[in-house]
Amino acid sequence: MSQHKSINQLQNGETATIVGYLSDEIPIKIYEMGLLPGVTLTKKQQLPFNGPVYLRIQDNPNAIALRKSEADLILIESIL
Amino acid sequence: MTEIEIALVGNPNVGKSTVFNRLTGLRQKVGNYPGITVEKKTGSFTHQQTRYHVIDLPGAYGIHPSSLDEEIVYDVLVDQTNPNHPELVVVIGDPFNIKRAVFLYQQIREMGLPAIFVVNMMDEAERSGTSIDVSKLENVLSTKVVLTDARSGKGIDQLKDALAFKPNGYAPSFVIPEEFTAATQYVREHTGQRNEYIAWLYLSQKQNKHLNNNQVEEITTARQTHGLNYHRLQIREALARHASLENQLTGVIKDPAKKKQYATERADHVLTHPVWGYVIFFALLLLIFQAIYTWSGPFMDAIDNAFAWLASSAGEWLPAGPINGLITDGIIAGIGGIVIFIPQIAILFIFISLMEESGYMSRVVYLMDRWLRPFGLSGKSAVPLMSGAACAIPAVMSARTIENDKERLITILVTPFMTCSARLPIYIVIIGLVIPPEKILGLDLQGLVLFGMYALGIVAALGSAWVLKQLMKSKYKSYLILELPTYKYPVVRNVLLNVWDKTKGFVWGAGKIILAISIILWVLGSFGVDERFMNAEDVVRSEKPGISETDFENEVQSQKLEYSFLGTMGRFIEPVIEPLGYDWKMGIGLISSFAAREVFVSTMATVYSLGGTDDELTIRERMAAEINPNTGKPAYNFASGISLLLFYAFAMQCMSTIAIVRKETNSWKWTFIQLAFMTGFAYIAALGAYQLLK
């Protein structure tokens, strides 16, 4: 597998697909909330001073917020 | 009539509580689960000759809990001997996240529990063009599926009919992988559990509180011999279920609308904006506090007048004497002192409830997380800290949604520093006595001092959080994975029910303590065994011959109080509080304040009326006229007043909070550390202030 970016490296407004995770030790809640491989998401914004990121999951009206440390764990592939 | 116990289970933000309120109406009550304070909502209703007892379980994403309130769901559902174990589970989901709800549904069915499935918020789905193939979904789930819109009440009757449905013939969708069957087999043999999926859950749960030590040991043995890690098992299950759900649910949801520019997204563009988001949040906080102080004014005046009238008519009707003082100054004034805060508490809870119902509260968590993290707190701590401005008890309970143990503990430990409404009557009376009613730069000085007291509470909470963060170690990584639901118009009924529950709880809790304390104080103040109490008249006559008749009466009364049980207690602690600028009478006020700080004013009223014969003065006039016998100065002068304000700002003086902290932390150690730290800090601050200012 080539070097993948993490959610943190997305620009605001950029869309990507989840391809995997950086480690096994990630909170079960990430899976339960549906942040699973194959899911397409868009980073909408991020709060200042490395604050949490605001994500939209495709076809879901609810948004999801993650801290930078969690966003680092989720690997993605950009959709051009 | 048959009776059936049902449980509502569902993901957060699917309108589960609205469904519950629709089903049970006002026939519901809020209690606690045994041993823990997670709020338990139960209610009942009758439909077609069947009595349904409903329990509303906390929202959860799956059967593997990440926070304390989610643990309840597993504990209640897995343990057949649990008093809340249901005969039928109603799983509630929303149309946009059906997969997540089915995930939870399958886990519950595979635990061997019969369940039906509800898709709520159908109106929102229809507006965005989403529809659901019910018969297909019923096939996939092997149960009855009901579509509802609890906000408008649509589908609730169909849901009631569906409760009679007997689901059967369920085929598990998660097959335990072969590499683990030896371990589950071992667990089944050694714990007596017949269900294989529950055996798997025993292995994959961090805790199995309902099992005995022997069974827990067997599970640990199974994990060790097979080299299993519970967290990995959870992930294994989650991935397997999601993979099969993808196929199972194809075609169930018809989602033709692709042009989804949701109103929520546009609103969040502003409301969670890196700059405007904060501006709006702080403007809202300002509005809330403005509302608490101005809107409540007329109501508070009316309540004040009503209680003043009640006290004066009771005072005239009852014969003069100590019983009169007990009833008018102690009980009526004390209860009035609580009732008067109902408008403020209700207004605060209306706002908090509106913020929760509308979905804005999740945005507050999102906005505050970055700023609270340096203090060892999480964005989720913002909710307890804000509620702490009303009352620490519901605030401490609301900390249960914080997943990380350390962040949750710190939040619980520092929330009582926030200026709760019980501190307000003391602040107002003392500020009125010792701060001159002047204007500084056009601002009311007394108002500024009151604002300063609130600021002091926040500084103390964050400062001690920072200290605790340095001292404590955490085993678990802290994280924030937060769902930001769509904005919704709040359901008035839900808001009112919530405000009613919270306000009633506060008034009942505090009212009972005030009544009890007033009576105990009166008894302790009216009896004594000391020689100078028993023969007060003779002692005064012999020590002060030639005293006038009225002075004689006063002298006897005050000597009796001084040597009563109560006076003895006050004099006993006097050496400790004298350096803070207090006399023994104020010492009695401090002692009784350890039950609840709001009783200070009514205690002082009881004490001063026991010690005097003059019933004309109001409590405030009496306090202003009181002379501290140690210093010869007014008891409430600038130095002792500031010292009292600081003491009440920091000291842990609320039995109910101590009890709730003990329950929530499940630790006497932390409860005592909190009590000692807050009270010790209060003592040092009050001592320093008095010694500098006197």
Image (cartoon, grey):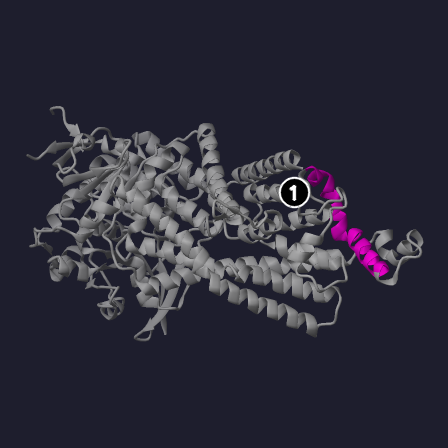
Q: Residue at x 23, y 33 (%)?
A: A71
Left or right of residue B97: residue B641: right
Q: Position of residue B79 (x, y in %)?
A: 38, 51
Q: Position of residue B236 (x, y in %)?
A: 23, 37
- Count of picture labels: 1
Left or right of residue B513: residue B235: left
* Residue, disc 1: B640
| Relative vertical location of residue B195 with respect to residue B117 in this rendering, above or below | above
Front one among B441 and B56:
B441
Q: Amino acid at mark 1?
A: Ser
Say which chain tag 1 marks. Answer: B
* Crowd around label 1: few <14 · some 14–19 · many ≥20 (10 Å): many
Q: What's the magenta region?
A: B551-579
Q: Position of residue B69 (x, y in %)?
A: 37, 48
| Relative vertical location of residue B112 with respect to residue B500 in this rendering, above or below | above
B569 inside magenta stretch: yes
Front one among B30 and B422:
B422
Q: Residue at x 46, y 58 (%)?
A: B344
Secondary structure mostly seen in the magenta stretch: helix
Q: Quadrant of residue B534?
A: bottom right
Q: Position of residue B304 (x, y in %)?
A: 55, 64
A50 inside magenta stretch: no
Inspect this view and state whether residue B666 appears: no
Give the secondary structure at mark 1.
helix
Q: Quadrant of residue B370?
A: top left
The quadrant the N terminus of chain B occupies is bottom left
Front one among B51 and B649:
B649
